[in-house]
Image (spheres, rainbow, N blue to C red):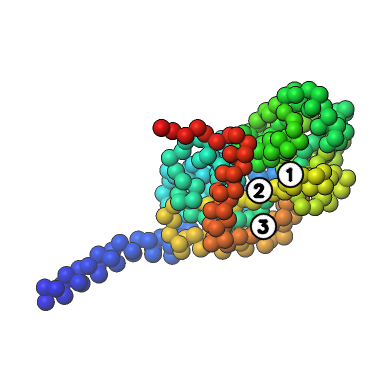
Amino acid sequence: MFRRSLVGAAALAIVGLTAPTLTLAQAFPAKPIKLVIAFPAGGPTDITMRQLADNASKVLGQPVVVENKPGAGGTLPAQALQTVQPDGYTIAQIPLGVFRIGYTTKVNWDPIKDISYVINVTGYAFGMVVPSDSPIKNWKDFVDYAKANPGKLTYGSTGNLTSPHLTTELLAQRAGIQLQHVPYKGNADLMQAIVGGHLMAASDSTGWAPQVEAGKLRVINTWGEKRLPKFPDAPTLKELGYDIVQNSPFGIGAPKGTPPEVVKKLHDAFKQAMEEPSYVAALGRYDMIPIYMSSAQYTAFAQDTMQREKVLIEKLGLAKPPTN
């Protein structure tokens, strides 16, 4: 009898522990959700993610409110996940820079163990641009100038250790040239700098497209498998002789420990939001396309990417020195 009472008490204790989790998952979402993104307002990431958030709001029945948190190579939203409740009400964009930070900076969290990967949604179309009145007309001109003026050719990107920065440095290494990198917080600041004559070149996603179409900038290369339909005259890096393709997939993560049922609700809502024509059209403005990965696929991608980025960081000589 006493043993049976103990068993019953244990069962009640388990129910008591799991009931709040089950209730949370069943009621989710009962209030607005905050989506933290890694780049400033007005750029391709902000515009496309706001459309995605709007679509997801309609599915979830609660607002998905975008908060911009630029800087630190796109890693601040992921860092923000480390200090919030794992209840699904704060989620974040996870750019590729998240998988590099541990190799270059001391951090007290792990990009694999300390994030619940919800869904991958898209990637970027990248390229390099120069002012339209620049004497640099193409990639050959760019390399020739850089070789004749080591370290004097200035280019901007959307931040240290972002894909535009590291891919350009890898490209420079393979071309045998030295460049001067100038980091910015996002596309809007970067475009102001190059159009204003403060930079000789810029590497970024196609947030530069309006300036190219307005005749202010010229595209000298793009970084996908194929040429961009809007800019068919700009060669890919592969066409220029470099075996480099960069589209920097990104998606949405939640804090470690977020209930699986909540992760699934978020995944299903954002997957439906991705399929809406309004989101596909928003991506199309920047030559971006939907790139879907499920929660399991996105987790596996994160693990693989951590290993690939380690190789790249070491190749560029950017790894932090070992601590004693």
Residue 253, visible in the rendered structure: yes
Label 2, label 1: how far apart the Cα atoms are:
9 Å
User: In the figure, 278 relative to 310: above or below?
Assistant: below
Residue appearing at x 56%, y 44% in the figure: 310
SS type, badge 3: strand
- Mark 2 or 1, nearer chain start: 1
| Residue 35: image location, x then y, percent | 55, 48
Callouts 3 and 1 close, C-beta under 8 Å: no
Residue ID for mark 1: 126
Looking at the image, residue 258 sits to the left or right of residue 3; the answer is right
Name of the residue lying farthest toward the left: 2
Callouts 2 and 1 close, C-beta under 8 Å: yes
SS type, badge 1: strand
Residue appearing at x 60%, y 56% in the figure: 120
The amino acid type of the residue labelled 2 equals Ser
Residue appearing at x 66%, y 45% in the figure: 45
Which of the labelled discs sits on residue 264, or is there none?
none
| Residue 151: image location, x then y, percent | 72, 24
Quadrant where the N terminus is found in the figure: bottom left
Residue ID for mark 2: 248
Q: Nearer the viewer, residue 90 or 224?
A: 224
Residue ID for mark 3: 291
